[in-house]
Image (spheres, rainbow, N blue to C red):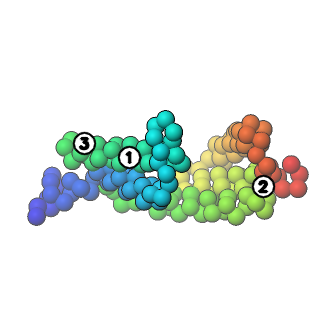
Amino acid sequence: MQVGKRGGLYRFLTKDFLSGAMFIAFGLLALYYGQNLAVGTPVRMGPGYVPRMLALIMMGLGVLICIIGLVAGSEPVEKPKWKPIVMVTIGIVCFALLFERAGLLPALIVLIGISSLGGEEFKLTEVIGNMVVLAIICTIVFKVGLGMNISIVRGVW
C-alpha cells in the first residue's frame, strides 16, 4: 500500500474526507436510534419521518463530501489544538452545572468567560461585550419570546 503524501492512505486523512465520514456516522447514529419510530407517509408523517429524512440527507451529503475530498484532494488533517477543545468543554460543563442553581445569566457569563480563555487572543473588552450581547439575546429569545420558565438570575428573576 502506498502511503506517500500524494496518495494512498493519506488521501483518507484529509479534512474533507473525514468531515464527510463524520456526517455519515451521525446519519447512521440517527437511523439507529430512530429505528423504532413510525415513519408514516409524506402526507401523514409519523414521529420518525423527519429524523429519518434528515439522517438520509446528512448521509448523502457525507458521501458527496467524501467523494469530492478524494477526487479533488484537500489539505491534510493537522494535530488538534487541545487548549480550545478543553476550555470550551469545561465551559459547557460549568454552564450545565450552574444553569439550574444560579440561573441563565451567571451560567452564560461563566461559559463565555471560560471558553474565551481557549482562544489565542484574549481581549477583556470583547469578552465582556460578548457576555452582554448574548445575555440580552438569550433573555429576549428564551424568557420573553418563547416564554420558557427559566430563571435569569436565581431568586431575582
Q: CA distance from mark 1 to mark 2?
A: 38 Å
Dot 1 lies on which element?
Answer: helix
Query: 36 or 108, which lies in front?
Result: 36
In which image quadrant can residue 117 be found? bottom right
Q: Is residue 85 left or right of residue 101?
A: left
Q: CA distance from mark 2 to mark 3?
A: 45 Å
Image location of residue 145, percent across then percent down: 74, 36
Query: 53 or 157, which lies in front?
Result: 53
User: Disc 2 designates what residue?
Assistant: 103
Image location of residue 23, percent across then percent down: 38, 51
Image location of residue 17, percent across then percent down: 28, 51
Type of amino acid under label 2: Gly
Q: Is residue 68 above or below residue 35?
A: above
Type of amino acid under label 1: Leu
Type of amino acid under label 3: Ile
Residue at point 53%, 52% (across, down):
119
Judge the density around disc 2: few (<14), some (14-19), many (≥20) Cα neighbours within 10 Å. some
Dot 3 lies on which element?
Answer: helix
Q: Is residue 123 left or right of residue 31?
A: right
Q: Earlier in the sequence, mark 2 or mark 3?
A: 3
User: Disc 3 designates what residue?
Assistant: 68
The mark found on residue 56 in the picture is: 1
Image location of residue 138, percent across then percent down: 71, 42
Residue at point 44%, 57% (across, down):
35
